[in-house]
Image (tube, helix red, strand yellow):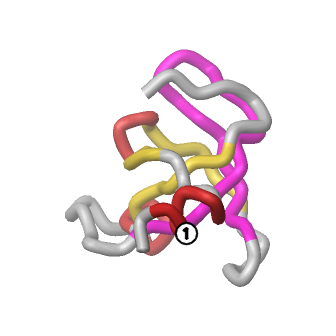
Amino acid sequence: MDVREGDRVLVNVAPFIGSVMRSNESIPCEVIEVNGLQVHVRAEPPYRDVSLWILSSWIEGRPQQKHELLASL
């Protein structure tokens, strides 16, 4: 997935807990910096303010916007 600084993305929870196994859960994050295949992300509220470098392969998509959620009802 092509991401840029300032993008909002969903990141698999695994790198946040130090796991190599992919989880079924994801955390909404803001992209702080991109360096090749590595992406510096920061968790968004309600999650604790944590930032870390991850491989871009941990990014699972973009969070749905409120209007997209309403349209899916």
Q: Position of residue 59 (x, y in %)?
A: 43, 45
Image quadrant occupied by the C terminus? bottom left
Quarter occupied by residue 57 = top left
The residue stretch that appears in magenta = 26-44
Q: Nearer the viewer, residue 24 or 63?
A: 63
Q: Nearer the viewer, residue 48 or 67?
A: 67
**Residue at 43%, 60% in the rendered image:** 15
The verdict on residue 34 being magenta is: yes
Circle 1 residues within 10 Å: few <14, some 14–19, many ≥20:
few
Q: Which residue is mark 1?
A: 70
Quarter occupied by residue 63 = bottom right
**Residue at 77%, 40% in the rendered image:** 32
Q: Position of residue 69 (x, y in %)?
A: 52, 66
Q: In this picture, is 35 found above or below 70?
A: above
Q: Position of residue 34 (x, y in %)?
A: 65, 26
Type of secondary structure dominating the magenta stretch = strand
**Residue at 44%, 74% in the rendered image:** 17
The verdict on residue 19 being magenta is: no
Q: In this picture, is 17 found above or below 22?
A: below
